[in-house]
Amino acid sequence: MAGIHTLFTCLDSIAPLSQPFNDYLIGAMQPAEYKKGSFLLREGTVCRNVWWLRKGFVRFYYRLGQQEISQCFISQNNMVLAISSLYQQGRSNQSIQAMEDCSTWLIDYPSLEYIYRHFPEAQVIGRKTAEQYYALLEKRLHAIALRKSVDRYHYLEEHFPELLQRVPLKYLASFIDLEVHTISRMRRKR
């Protein structure tokens, strides 16, 4: 299972992993590839997996009428999941789309539930992952709460510099609640 070492290193940095946990995870994880533009999850479907993004970049978004609103972006060496849909096993109100070709390891929901019941370290990892997602969404909400568009753009530069290089303007604009022409004008001034 080439490439899974980075996942174990990351997980072990969150909570020390037991050998039985490692052994179970090796058997439960499956590789999955997604082409740029394809979906890991579509709005209206149930999230049945957690992905470890080995390579690539994904966008979470929801629809508001005809408009797509970007909620967050996740880069490689991070977990990808629609928290509410996964844990409640209900329909997702968001989509997860590959912004670049992506290589992942995935674990399905029944296997995830098994590790939560049988391995205490999995509960710590799950909680820490939820905390990370909450902190990321809190940062985005703070950016949107800034009144002036220039302040929102500066917040983006300071807290999400990677996005300026990897994300198309239309998605950046919806992420910080600006019009595309406004963010384009700000970029030109830099």
Image (cartoon, helix red, strand yellow):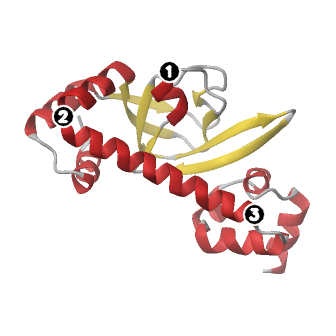
Which residue is under mark 2? Answer: 119
**In the displayed structure, does residue 93 sit left or right of residue 180?**
left
User: Which sits earlier in the primary sequence, circle 1 or circle 3?
Assistant: 1
Q: Mark 3: few, some, or many residues within 10 Å (few <14, many ≥20)? A: few
Q: CA distance from mark 2 to mark 3?
A: 40 Å
Which residue is under mark 3? Answer: 145
Q: Position of residue 36 (x, y in %)?
A: 60, 38
Q: Position of residue 104 (x, y in %)?
A: 41, 37
The foreground one among 73 and 122 is: 122
Which residue is under mark 1? Answer: 89
Q: CA distance from mark 2 to mark 1?
A: 21 Å
Which residue is pictured at 77% across the width and 34% down the height?
63
Total labels drawn:
3
Which residue is pictured at 46% across the width and 22% down the height?
48
User: Which sits earlier in the primary sequence, circle 2 or circle 1?
Assistant: 1
Q: Mark 1: few, some, or many residues within 10 Å (few <14, many ≥20)? A: some
User: Which sits earlier in the primary sequence, circle 2 or circle 3?
Assistant: 2
Q: Amino acid at mark 1?
A: Gln
Quadrant where the image shows the C terminus:
bottom right
Residue 189, placed above or below residue 123: below
